Image (tube, rainbow, N blue to C red):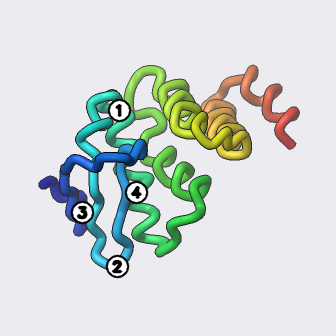
């Protein structure tokens, strides 16, 4: 069990589930699937926890993109290659459902962040997302 600001994180086997984590929005408990959790890097694990935290804060368990954006805001710039690591995580999580909207949204977040931090390449690429 690990506390994440007022949220409780419980690690347990979740047979039959491929999702690395889920949250009970009524209690604020994040359940981490120990069967797949080791497949994720420490960076990805933190991003997943922030994603689940926003499901709880918003009370919405359906808006994956909003939760990704919340996690991105907490993870961007925290370590070398964080933008690439984050977009790769979202691609990994989205492949099962082939959620191209979610993948594009994470790429756009990364480009916006890079553009705001002086990347001319990102500024140019953002033109294609609008």
Answer yes or no: is residue 31 visible: yes
Cα–Cα span, label 1 and label 2: 27 Å
Query: Would residue 128 appear left or right of 76 to someone viewing this image?
Result: right
Specify the label residue 5 is tagged with.
Answer: 3
Asked if disc 1 and disc 3 are in contact, CB closer than 8 Å, the reply is no
Cα–Cα span, label 2 and label 4: 13 Å
Q: Give the mark nearest the N terminus, 1 or 4.
A: 1
Secondary element under disc 3, as helix, strand or loop, is: loop
- Number of numbered tags placed on the structure image: 4
Cα–Cα span, label 1 and label 4: 15 Å
The N terminus lies in quadrant: bottom left
Callout in the foreground (4, 3): 4
The C terminus lies in quadrant: top right
Q: Residues within 10 Å of mark 2 (few under 14, many from 20)?
A: few
Residue nearest the viewer, comparing 90 with 83: 90
Residue nearest the viewer, comparing 102 with 124: 102
């Amino acid at each position: 069990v690990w506390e994440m600001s007022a949220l409780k994180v419980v690690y347990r086997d979740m047979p039959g589930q491929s999702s690395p984590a889920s949250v009970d929005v009524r209690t604020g408990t994040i359940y981490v699937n120990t069967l797949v959790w080791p497949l994720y890097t420490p960076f990805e694990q933190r991003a997943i926890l922030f994603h689940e935290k926003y499901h709880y804060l918003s009370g919405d368990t359906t808006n994956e993109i909003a939760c990704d954006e919340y996690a991105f805001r907490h993870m961007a710039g925290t370590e070398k290659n964080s933008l690439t690591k984050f977009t790769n995580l979202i691609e990994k999580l989205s492949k099962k459902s082939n959620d191209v909207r979610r993948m594009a949204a994470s790429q756009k977040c990364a480009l916006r962040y890079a553009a705001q931090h002086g990347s001319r390449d990102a500024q140019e690429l953002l033109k294609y997302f609008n």
